[in-house]
Amino acid sequence: MANIFNTARLALARRRRGMTKRELAEALGGITAKALGDFEGGMYSPDESRMDALARVLGFPVEFFYRDDPECLSDESVSFRSMASMKAGQREAALAAGEIALELAEWIGKQFDLPSVNVPDMRGATPEAAADAVRAAWGLGEKPVKSMIHLLEAHGVRVFSLSEKNDEVDAFSFWRGGTPYCFLNTMKSAEHSRMDGAHELGHLVLHRHGPPSGRDAENEANEFASAFLMPRAQTLATAPRTPTLPACISHKHIFGTSVMAYVRRLHTLGMISDWHYRSLCIQITKLGYRRSEPEPAPHESSKMLTKVFDALRAGGMSKADVARALNIYSADLDALVFGLVVTSVPGDGMKSPPRGALKLV
């Protein structure tokens, strides 16, 4: 814990709230954007009354601003699912959430022995070959993936929620210190989230050190996700003899994907013609199935985070205690595990959480 005001913490808190310096200055009142910039630039520190106002407006405890420097994430180190459609403020808020999650992950890692990282480096491989290789390395064969979140966690990927209430922010991932991280927008459908998880796995195995970037990287991650969730042999073996839309809706459940993703995979594998594919796409769009999935699957949850919070609760440590350890409020902790943890974590606080190994089966 630092003893002096940390300018990087002020910038982090402001970005997490999606605010510009001007917007924060207006919310505070009696301060200009330039003066606020001087705070962030380290020209001088806010006095006690101004510090209280900053903490109140930004929704972080005063102690948050006196912690050590956060680990900074940049656009270049992170693969965003929908970079093109994201506004700058949305991107900055998502990156800030990732920086706070790194601190939560570090804290959890000190209390529990988490699954070791087993994510193959497949740089240079085609997306289809990479998907087959990862399936082989993880012993999946041609079996459908039961839970994408569980699978990622079991192989060392730290999965957190990105509970942003907009369509532009889907998911993102990055490597940090030899550990892969994946953030999923849990406000989306289960099918969408599964595909996002597989898409981010594609980035993690294909683009471990960045390039290629932009549309090429997104296309490769899309191809990987499709091949990973719907392996060629199993998809061909189980495809409907007459792939009408009702038949495709029925068969999508084999793989837990959206009907649109399933139809696209059939087309990629040559199971339906261009004309047939376009016809199905028109039907899917007309019926609103691009936004509202027919016969939706149940949402997945995190076994690892659930076990973590269950163990903490059993030891008498509440969610509020964890938040206090990170000098954040419970709402920001909730945002990182929203939709991933199915159990609540009430209980009286304790000073030392129990340490244990987590085994995901």
Image (cartoon, rainbow, N blue to C red):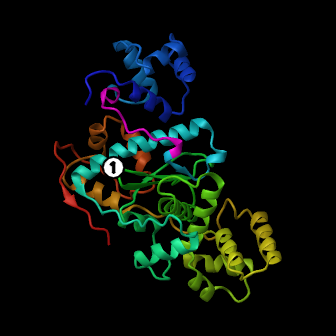
- SS for callout 1: helix
> Can residue 296 be seen from the camera position used here?
no
Note whether 119 is above or below 268 in the view shown: above
User: Closest to the observer: 345 or 28?
Assistant: 28
- Magenta span of residues: 63-76
Quarter holding the C terminus?
A: bottom left
Q: Quadrant of residue 101?
A: top left
Note whether 161 is above or below 293 in the view shown: above
Q: Is residue 284 left or right of residue 136?
A: right
> Can residue 208 be seen from the camera position used here?
yes
Which residue sits furthest front?
Answer: 124
Give the residue pinned by disc 1. 105
* Mark 1 residue type: Ala
As for residue 148 lying within the magenta part, the answer is no
Q: Position of residue 7 (x, y in %)?
A: 39, 24
Q: Position of residue 164 (x, y in %)?
A: 54, 45
Note whether 201 is above or below 144 in the view shown: above
Q: Position of residue 279 (x, y in %)?
A: 81, 73
Q: Quadrant of residue 289?
A: bottom right
Which residue sits furthest top?
Answer: 30
Q: Position of residue 271 (x, y in %)?
A: 71, 83
As for residue 73 lying within the magenta part, the answer is yes
Note whether 150 is above or below 35 in the view shown: below
Q: Residue at x 60, y 63 (%)?
A: 220
Q: Residue at x 58, y 35 (%)?
A: 89
Q: Quadrant of residue 156?
A: bottom left
Q: Is residue 265 left or right of residue 194?
A: right
Q: Residues within 10 Å of mark 1 (few under 14, many from 20)?
A: some
Badge count: 1
